[in-house]
């Protein structure tokens, strides 16, 4: 007999596993039907994994807040899309400027400011 670990006393790991499996299936279906999306996300991750991780985390937080505010499904989808793609234009900004830890030069700052326009173009 298999024992289930309890999380928060409200659901078991097994139930969460079933739900996460469905989420993964949905993601796989979406990516399979839109190869360009997969390519874009892979390009972002390959260029700078921080941008990808930041965008993914921002999307989760944005959707959680939107759901808490009872935003309708169509608007949530638009909100999530904006969140996941908000920094995609940074793949056209020189990586040296993106990863610079010190103060940016005026030129570097101008390059980074252009990422929204680049993202729109993409």
Image: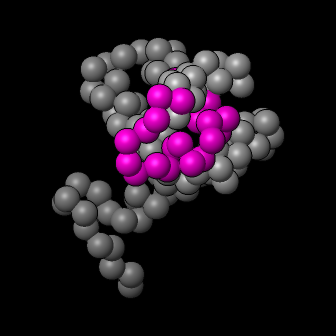
Q: Is residue 45 above or below residue 86?
A: below
| Magenta extent | 80-107
Q: Residue at x 41, y 65 (%)?
A: 14
Q: Is residue 116 above or below residue 34?
A: above
Q: Residue at x 67, y 35 (%)?
A: 92
Furthest-left residue in view?
9
The C terminus lies in quadrant: top right
Tell me: 43 left or right of 5.
Answer: right
Inspect this view and state whether residue 13 appears: yes
Q: What is the magenta segment's predominant secondary structure?
A: helix
Question: Which residue is more in the foreground, 89 or 110?
Answer: 110
- Where in the figure is residue 89, as x and y percent of width and height? 62, 30
The N terminus lies in quadrant: bottom left
Q: Residue at x 76, y 43 (%)?
A: 39
User: Is 93 within the magenta?
Assistant: yes
Q: Residue at x 34, y 24 (%)?
A: 66
- Where in the figure is residue 101, as x and y percent of width and height? 40, 51
Q: Is residue 47 above or below residue 35?
A: below
User: Is 103 within the magenta?
Assistant: yes
- Where in the figure is residue 29, as x and y percent of width and height? 71, 43
Tell me: 82 left or right of 66.
Answer: right
Inspect this view and state whether residue 53 appears: no
- Where in the figure is residue 40, as x and y percent of width and height? 71, 39
**Total numbered labels placed on residues in the image:** 0
Q: Quadrant of residue 57?
A: top left
Tell me: 53 left or right of 63.
Answer: right
How did the renderer colour the structure? Answer: one colour
Q: Quadrant of residue 94?
A: top right
């Amino acid at each position: 007999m298999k024992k289930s670990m309890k999380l928060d006393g409200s659901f078991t790991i097994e139930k969460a596993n079933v739900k996460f499996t469905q989420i993964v299936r949905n993601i796989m279906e979406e990516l399979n039907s839109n190869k360009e999306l997969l390519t874009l996300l892979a390009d972002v991750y390959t260029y700078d994994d921080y941008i990808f991780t930041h965008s993914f985390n921002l999307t989760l937080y944005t959707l959680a807040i939107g759901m808490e505010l009872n935003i309708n499904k169509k608007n949530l989808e638009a909100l999530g899309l904006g969140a996941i793609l908000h920094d995609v234009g940074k793949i056209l900004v020189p990586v040296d400027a993106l990863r610079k830890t010190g103060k940016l030069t005026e030129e570097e700052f101008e390059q980074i400011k252009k990422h929204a326009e680049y993202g729109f173009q993409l």
